[in-house]
Image (cartoon, helix red, strand yellow):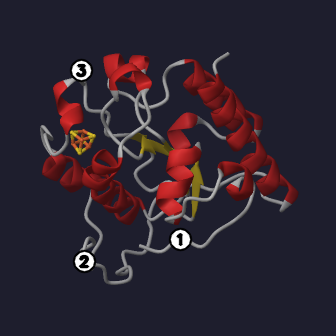
Protein backbone atom coordinates (compact mmCIF):
# COMPACT_ATOMS: atom_id res chain seq x y z
CA UNK A 1 0.00 0.00 0.00
CA UNK A 2 1.52 3.34 -0.98
CA UNK A 3 2.18 6.11 1.52
CA UNK A 4 -0.55 8.36 0.18
CA UNK A 5 -3.22 5.71 0.77
CA UNK A 6 -1.86 4.90 4.23
CA UNK A 7 -1.90 8.56 5.17
CA UNK A 8 -5.50 8.96 4.06
CA UNK A 9 -6.63 5.90 5.98
CA UNK A 10 -4.73 6.90 9.11
CA UNK A 11 -6.21 10.42 8.99
CA UNK A 12 -9.76 9.27 8.52
CA UNK A 13 -9.58 6.47 11.07
CA UNK A 14 -8.16 8.81 13.64
CA UNK A 15 -10.83 11.40 12.92
CA UNK A 16 -13.73 8.97 13.02
CA UNK A 17 -12.45 7.30 16.19
CA UNK A 18 -12.23 10.73 17.75
CA UNK A 19 -15.85 11.40 16.80
CA UNK A 20 -16.87 8.07 18.32
CA UNK A 21 -15.02 8.91 21.53
CA UNK A 22 -16.97 12.15 21.61
CA UNK A 23 -20.14 10.07 21.61
CA UNK A 24 -21.07 10.56 17.94
CA UNK A 25 -22.14 7.11 16.74
CA UNK A 26 -23.98 8.18 13.63
CA UNK A 27 -24.50 11.29 11.56
CA UNK A 28 -28.12 12.17 10.83
CA UNK A 29 -29.19 13.21 7.34
CA UNK A 30 -31.37 16.25 7.12
CA UNK A 31 -33.60 16.71 4.10
CA UNK A 32 -34.16 20.38 4.73
CA UNK A 33 -31.48 22.70 6.03
CA UNK A 34 -31.78 26.36 6.93
CA UNK A 35 -30.75 28.57 4.04
CA UNK A 36 -29.51 31.41 6.19
CA UNK A 37 -26.65 33.41 4.80
CA UNK A 38 -23.12 32.54 5.83
CA UNK A 39 -20.62 35.20 6.80
CA UNK A 40 -19.93 37.69 4.07
CA UNK A 41 -16.88 36.96 1.98
CA UNK A 42 -15.50 38.31 -1.23
CA UNK A 43 -15.59 34.79 -2.62
CA UNK A 44 -18.91 33.70 -1.25
CA UNK A 45 -22.26 35.24 -2.14
CA UNK A 46 -24.56 35.93 0.84
CA UNK A 47 -27.10 33.30 -0.17
CA UNK A 48 -25.95 29.71 -0.66
CA UNK A 49 -25.80 28.61 -4.28
CA UNK A 50 -27.01 25.17 -5.27
CA UNK A 51 -24.46 22.54 -6.18
CA UNK A 52 -25.84 22.58 -9.71
CA UNK A 53 -25.12 26.31 -9.92
CA UNK A 54 -21.56 25.77 -8.69
CA UNK A 55 -21.01 22.97 -11.20
CA UNK A 56 -22.39 25.13 -14.01
CA UNK A 57 -20.10 28.00 -13.08
CA UNK A 58 -17.09 25.67 -13.03
CA UNK A 59 -18.01 24.47 -16.51
CA UNK A 60 -15.29 22.94 -18.66
CA UNK A 61 -12.77 24.59 -16.40
CA UNK A 62 -9.45 25.74 -17.80
CA UNK A 63 -8.50 28.03 -14.95
CA UNK A 64 -5.26 26.16 -14.26
CA UNK A 65 -2.82 24.00 -16.19
CA UNK A 66 -4.31 20.74 -14.91
CA UNK A 67 -7.04 20.97 -17.54
CA UNK A 68 -4.46 20.01 -20.16
CA UNK A 69 -3.69 16.61 -18.63
CA UNK A 70 -6.95 15.59 -16.99
CA UNK A 71 -9.29 13.08 -18.55
CA UNK A 72 -12.29 14.06 -16.42
CA UNK A 73 -13.11 16.92 -14.11
CA UNK A 74 -14.11 15.29 -10.81
CA UNK A 75 -16.57 17.65 -9.17
CA UNK A 76 -17.77 15.53 -6.23
CA UNK A 77 -20.72 13.35 -5.34
CA UNK A 78 -23.04 12.45 -2.52
CA UNK A 79 -25.80 13.90 -0.39
CA UNK A 80 -26.41 17.52 -1.38
CA UNK A 81 -27.37 18.33 2.20
CA UNK A 82 -24.85 16.10 3.93
CA UNK A 83 -24.03 16.62 7.57
CA UNK A 84 -20.56 15.17 6.96
CA UNK A 85 -18.44 16.42 4.06
CA UNK A 86 -15.22 14.60 3.21
CA UNK A 87 -12.54 16.54 1.37
CA UNK A 88 -9.46 14.89 -0.07
CA UNK A 89 -6.51 16.25 -1.97
CA UNK A 90 -7.32 15.57 -5.61
CA UNK A 91 -8.40 12.89 -8.06
CA UNK A 92 -6.09 9.94 -8.74
CA UNK A 93 -5.97 7.65 -11.76
CA UNK A 94 -9.25 5.81 -11.14
CA UNK A 95 -11.07 8.99 -10.24
CA UNK A 96 -9.82 10.64 -13.43
CA UNK A 97 -11.09 7.69 -15.46
CA UNK A 98 -14.47 7.38 -13.76
CA UNK A 99 -15.14 11.04 -12.99
CA UNK A 100 -15.99 10.24 -9.37
CA UNK A 101 -14.09 11.00 -6.16
CA UNK A 102 -12.50 8.26 -4.05
CA UNK A 103 -13.26 5.26 -6.22
CA UNK A 104 -9.78 3.71 -6.21
CA UNK A 105 -8.27 1.62 -3.42
CA UNK A 106 -8.41 4.51 -0.99
CA UNK A 107 -12.04 5.03 -1.92
CA UNK A 108 -12.95 1.42 -1.24
CA UNK A 109 -11.34 1.68 2.16
CA UNK A 110 -13.09 4.96 2.80
CA UNK A 111 -16.41 3.23 2.08
CA UNK A 112 -15.56 0.47 4.58
CA UNK A 113 -14.47 2.94 7.22
CA UNK A 114 -17.72 4.88 6.80
CA UNK A 115 -19.70 1.67 7.06
CA UNK A 116 -17.87 0.84 10.29
CA UNK A 117 -19.56 3.88 11.83
CA UNK A 118 -22.88 3.03 10.18
CA UNK A 119 -22.67 5.52 7.33
CA UNK A 120 -23.22 4.80 3.66
CA UNK A 121 -21.28 6.70 1.02
CA UNK A 122 -24.48 8.25 -0.27
CA UNK A 123 -25.15 9.88 3.08
CA UNK A 124 -22.01 12.02 2.96
CA UNK A 125 -20.64 14.36 0.31
CA UNK A 126 -17.17 13.60 -1.05
CA UNK A 127 -14.96 15.93 -3.05
CA UNK A 128 -11.39 17.21 -3.28
CA UNK A 129 -9.42 20.42 -2.94
CA UNK A 130 -8.63 20.32 -6.66
CA UNK A 131 -10.95 18.81 -9.23
CA UNK A 132 -8.45 17.59 -11.83
CA UNK A 133 -5.78 14.92 -11.46
CA UNK A 134 -2.21 16.19 -11.30
CA UNK A 135 0.14 14.29 -13.63
CA UNK A 136 1.55 11.17 -11.95
CA UNK A 137 -0.48 12.07 -8.86
CA UNK A 138 2.06 14.71 -7.88
CA UNK A 139 1.17 17.16 -5.15
CA UNK A 140 -1.13 20.05 -6.11
CA UNK A 141 0.77 23.28 -6.80
CA UNK A 142 -0.15 26.60 -5.17
CA UNK A 143 -1.59 28.17 -8.34
CA UNK A 144 -3.77 25.09 -8.91
CA UNK A 145 -5.15 25.23 -5.38
CA UNK A 146 -5.66 28.97 -5.65
CA UNK A 147 -7.72 28.60 -8.83
CA UNK A 148 -9.78 25.66 -7.67
CA UNK A 149 -10.34 26.45 -4.00
CA UNK A 150 -13.07 29.08 -4.54
CA UNK A 151 -15.26 26.37 -6.04
CA UNK A 152 -14.72 24.12 -3.03
CA UNK A 153 -15.80 26.99 -0.80
CA UNK A 154 -18.94 27.37 -2.90
CA UNK A 155 -19.61 23.64 -2.58
CA UNK A 156 -19.28 23.94 1.19
CA UNK A 157 -21.56 26.96 1.10
CA UNK A 158 -24.14 25.02 -0.92
CA UNK A 159 -24.06 21.94 1.31
CA UNK A 160 -23.56 23.63 4.68
CA UNK A 161 -22.17 20.55 6.42
CA UNK A 162 -21.88 20.42 10.17
CA UNK A 163 -18.65 18.42 10.03
CA UNK A 164 -15.87 18.58 7.45
CA UNK A 165 -13.34 15.76 7.43
CA UNK A 166 -10.09 16.76 5.70
CA UNK A 167 -8.11 13.83 4.34
CA UNK A 168 -4.40 14.33 3.91
CA UNK A 169 -1.91 17.11 4.22
CA UNK A 170 -3.09 19.41 1.45
CA UNK A 171 -6.74 19.23 2.38
CA UNK A 172 -6.05 19.99 6.03
CA UNK A 173 -3.50 22.73 5.36
CA UNK A 174 -5.67 24.43 2.73
CA UNK A 175 -8.86 24.40 4.77
CA UNK A 176 -7.08 25.52 7.94
CA UNK A 177 -4.83 28.02 6.12
CA UNK A 178 -1.71 26.69 7.78
CA UNK A 179 1.64 25.14 6.94
CA UNK A 180 1.58 23.01 10.07
CA UNK A 181 2.43 19.34 9.65
CA UNK A 182 -0.38 16.85 9.40
CA UNK A 183 0.92 15.11 12.51
CA UNK A 184 0.11 18.19 14.56
CA UNK A 185 -3.24 18.83 12.84
CA UNK A 186 -4.55 15.27 12.85
CA UNK A 187 -7.31 14.10 15.18
CA UNK A 188 -8.47 17.51 16.41
CA UNK A 189 -11.56 19.66 15.87
CA UNK A 190 -11.23 23.14 14.37
CA UNK A 191 -13.76 25.85 13.68
CA UNK A 192 -14.26 26.51 9.99
CA UNK A 193 -16.05 29.55 8.66
CA UNK A 194 -16.42 30.63 5.07
S1 LIG B 1 -8.00 21.79 -11.04
FE1 LIG B 1 -9.74 23.16 -10.69
S2 LIG B 1 -9.05 25.18 -11.45
FE2 LIG B 1 -7.69 23.61 -12.34
S3 LIG B 1 -8.62 23.13 -14.31
FE3 LIG B 1 -9.37 21.63 -12.81
S4 LIG B 1 -11.31 22.46 -12.11
FE4 LIG B 1 -10.18 24.14 -13.11
C-alpha gap between disc 2 and disc 1: 16 Å
Which image quadrant: the N terminus?
top right
| Viewer-closest of 24 and 96 | 96
Looking at the rendered structure, the secondary structure element under dot 3 is loop
Residue at the extreme right of the image, as rendered:
21
| Viewer-closest of 83 and 103 | 103
Side of 152 where 184 appears, left or right: right
Q: Which mark is residue 42?
A: 2
Q: Looking at the picture, how far across and down is residue 33, in whole percent?
A: 45, 68
Image point (39%, 19%), residue name: 136
Q: Looking at the picture, how far across and down is residue 9, in whole percent?
A: 69, 33
In the image, residue 22 above or below residue 145: below
Q: Could you tell which of marks 1 and 3 lies nearer the N-terminus? A: 3
Looking at the rendered structure, the secondary structure element under dot 1 is loop
Q: Could you tell which of marks 2 and 1 lies nearer the N-terminus? A: 2
In the image, residue 14 above or below residue 43: above
Where residue 36 sits, quadrant-wise, is: bottom left
Side of 65 where 21 appears, left or right: right
C-alpha gap between disc 2 and disc 3: 31 Å
Amino acid sequence: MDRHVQEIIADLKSYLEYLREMGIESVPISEERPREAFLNSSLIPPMPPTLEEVRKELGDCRRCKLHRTRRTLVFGEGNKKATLMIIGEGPGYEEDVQGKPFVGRAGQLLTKILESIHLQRGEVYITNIIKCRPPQNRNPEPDEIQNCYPFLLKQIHAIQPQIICALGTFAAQTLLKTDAKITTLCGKFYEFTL
